[in-house]
Image (cartoon, grey):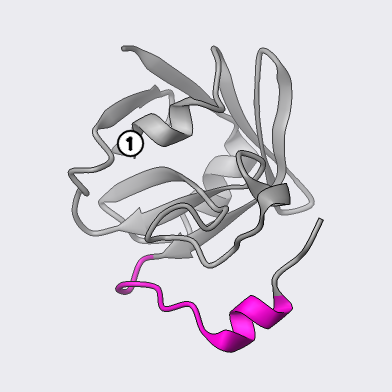
């Protein structure tokens, strides 16, 4: 499986602010260990870049990219992606799109510092559809 992504210069500036050896393209919908966001309305609609110091064996799909990033994703994310991924930035906000259109108009970037613990406060403040 070949996946490729075009990272526009403005988006690359944002990503380069984080010192990371590995970058993951990860869902941010509560479905994985990197996400605190949750709710049925966010499934497949929210993505994030997770900046890490080492690879995660669960993220085993390499994303070729024009920026030379060590970029990976996993099978669950691929369910929501099609050909010709593009990451752009407008007013410091990252967008992810593909041939089908905009996938996420407000991607986040987080530095991985350890496992995410979802608190009762997180659950209370979670968006509902």
Rendering coords of residue 93 (x, y %): 72, 51
Residue 74 location, quadrant: top left
Pointer 1 residue: 72
Start-end of magenta stretch: 112-125
Residue at 64% x, 41% y is: 10
Residue at 79% x, 51% y is: 91
Rendering coords of residue 90 (x, y %): 77, 44
Question: Is-magenta flag for residue 120?
Answer: yes
> Which quarter of the rendering shows the N terminus?
top left
> Which quarter of the rendering shows the C terminus?
bottom right
Q: Is residue 67 above or below residue 105?
A: above
Q: Is residue 120 above or below residue 113?
A: below
Rendering coords of residue 110 (x, y %): 48, 63
In this picture, residue 39 sits left or right of residue 23: right
| Total marks placed | 1
- Which SS class for mark 1? strand
Is 16 or 123 nearer to us in this picture?
123
How packed mark 1 is, by other alpha carbons closer than 10 Å (few <14, some 14-19, many 20 or more), is: many
Residue at 24% x, 33% y is: 60
Residue at 36% x, 66% y is: 112
Residue 72 location, quadrant: top left
Is 114 or 66 nearer to us in this picture?
114
């Amino acid at each position: 499986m070949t996946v490729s992504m075009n990272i526009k210069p403005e988006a690359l500036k944002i990503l380069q602010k984080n010192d990371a050896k590995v970058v993951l393209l990860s869902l941010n919908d509560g479905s994985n260990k990197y996400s605190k966001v949750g709710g049925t309305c966010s499934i497949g609609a929210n993505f994030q870049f997770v900046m890490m110091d080492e690879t995660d064996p669960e993220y085993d799909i390499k994303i070729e990219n024009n920026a030379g990033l060590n970029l990976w994703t996993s099978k669950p994310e691929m369910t929501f992606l099609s050909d010709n991924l593009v990451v752009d930035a407008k007013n410091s906000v990252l967008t992810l799109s593909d041939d089908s259109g905009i996938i996420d108009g407000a991607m986040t970037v987080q530095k991985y510092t350890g496992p995410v613990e979802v608190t009762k406060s997180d659950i209370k403040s979670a968006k509902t559809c």
